[in-house]
Each structure stands twice: as C-alpha cells, then as structure tokens.
Image (cartoon, rainbow, N blue to C red):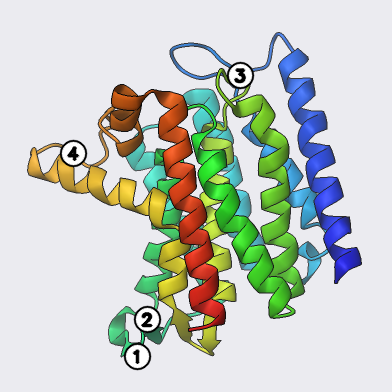
Amino acid sequence: MAQSLLLCLLPSCAVTVALAALIVSRRRWPLRAVGDGRRIGGPALAAGLLAGAALTLPRLPGTLLAGAAVVLVLGLLDDRFDLRAWQKLLVQAAAAGLAVAAIGPVQRIDLGGAIPTGPFAVAVPFLWILATTNAANLIDGLDGLAASVLTPSFAALGALAVLADRRPEALAALGAAGALVAFLPFNRRPAHLLLGDTGAEFLGFTLGVLTLRLLTTAPGVWSAGPALLLALVPLSDTGFAIGRRLLRGRSILRGDRQHIHHRLAARLGETRAIIILSGIACLCALGGTLLRTIG
C-alpha cells in the first residue's frame, strides 16, 4: 500500500504543478474569470487528481467514470461560456444519476441506528452527490478557501481508505489531496490561478462519490455521520445560502455575496476568514475520522 501511495501522490503533485505553471505562463489562456479576467487553473487540478488515481481508473465502473467526465466537461464549458445556473444543474443531475447507477441505492442510513430510506433509496445518494458538487463550487468565494477547506476532507478520506485497505478509494482521495496541496501556492491570496467551476465542481463530485463508496457499514447501509462532518463546512454554507434566499423570496439559483466566508472576510479580513474556516474543516475532518474508526 505504501508504494501505491507514492505512485499516487508524486504524479498528482507533479502534474498539477507542471500544468499550473504552464497556464500561468500563457498569455492567451481561454478560461478566465468573469470580471477580473484572472486565469482559471481548474483543469490543472483535475488532471493532477486523475494522474494520482490513474492506477485505479480502469477498475472503476464505466458509468461512474462517465459521470466524472460529464462534470469535468461541464466545468470547462461553464468557465469558457458562463452557462446559466439551471443549465448547470440539469447536467450535474445527469452526472449524479450516472454515478448512482454505479454506486447503487442507499437502503439504510446509519446515524447511531439504522434508518430505512424506503422509496428514497436512490434519491439519497443522488441528492448527496448533487449537494457536494454545488457546495464545493459555492465555497470557492475567496482566494485559496476551497482548496484549504477541502484538503483536510480528502486527507481524512485517504486515511480511512488506507485503514480499511480500500486501494481505489485511497488513490482517488490522496490524489485529490495531493493535487490540492500542489495547487494551493498558485491559488492562495492573491491568486494567480482560480479553481473555477472546472476544479470546484470536479472536487465536489469526487467528494460525494468517495464518501458514498467508502463510508458504508454494510451493503446498502451508509454511515452518514462521518460523511456529513467531512463535508460540513461547504454544506453548511450552501444550506444557509438556500435558506436565506428562500426567506427573502429570491431564487435559490441566484448568486450573492452574503455567504459565510464573505461575511467573515468583511469583518475580519480574507486571511483570517480562511484560517477560521480551514481550521473548522480540519476539526470536522478529525471528528469524521474518529467517528468512523471508533464509533
């Protein structure tokens, strides 16, 4: 397993750094943020993740790989052409459906006791992947924030996969963590490269799939407690955003700058806001790991 981890982390970091440096050096890079025109380096991170997980990709179900490909292409198109929110949601739903076809239904949720899902056995994993995909995208509101918040989650998933001797999940999770660590120097404030939808949505999709595949206590039984902790920071921000917009009678698909990280940054500054949220993410990742291994 140790050799496999090295074969995962080294390509992941190397590919991410090499492509990120290439993107920074290119003057005519086509993927740029609307508004300030900064380069979007999400393709470098996605390539690094895939490089780290390359050894396990041929063993994964075809529908799962197809779902990941759909999310990746969607991110590229959105970063290039700035798609409408409902268009993105429809394609994300198709990708989530492909992933669920490979993962299977969640017949019971383990939250200290088995909770039957009944007719919602397919809806639970579908909505979870859809939620994590969008949550990772929404938390990417400050330079370096999404990378800082998601790295502990993938590192924890990698550790859990190693302890459980789940090689495919370990390679994918640690490949994502390695790509994020390598990308962060380009993404931290002031960012030379942004994650964009390509990087953020691909990471969110990967997080959703890994938490479903890895955090199972029996066939069809999903350990939701650790999963919720591992994704708590981006999911809570998304939940607050949806609730706030509904209370104000606004569309939940219409963006704003009232997210948790925006409010913290306005009061404490961006650097302190990122430190606080990444610290909470580290504690949540530790809590999810302990809950899974001890609980």
Residue under pointer 2: 121
Q: CA distance from mark 3 to mark 4?
A: 29 Å
Q: Tell which circle, 2 or 4, labels the residue nearer the N-terminal end.
A: 2
Task: List x then y, in percent, for residue 243.
Answer: 17, 48
Q: Is residue 266 above or below residue 45?
A: above
Task: List x then y, in percent, for residue 165.
Answer: 74, 79
Helix, strand or loop status at disc 4: loop
Left or right for 226, reference 186: left
Left or right for 237, reference 178: left
Q: Residue at x 67, y 50 (%)?
A: 177
Residue under pointer 1: 113
Residue 70: give its label: none
The residue type indicated by label 3 comes to: Arg
The residue type indicated by label 4 comes to: Ser
Helix, strand or loop status at disc 2: loop
Q: Tell which circle, 1 or 2, labels the residue nearer the N-terminal end.
A: 1
Q: CA distance from mark 1 to mark 3?
A: 47 Å
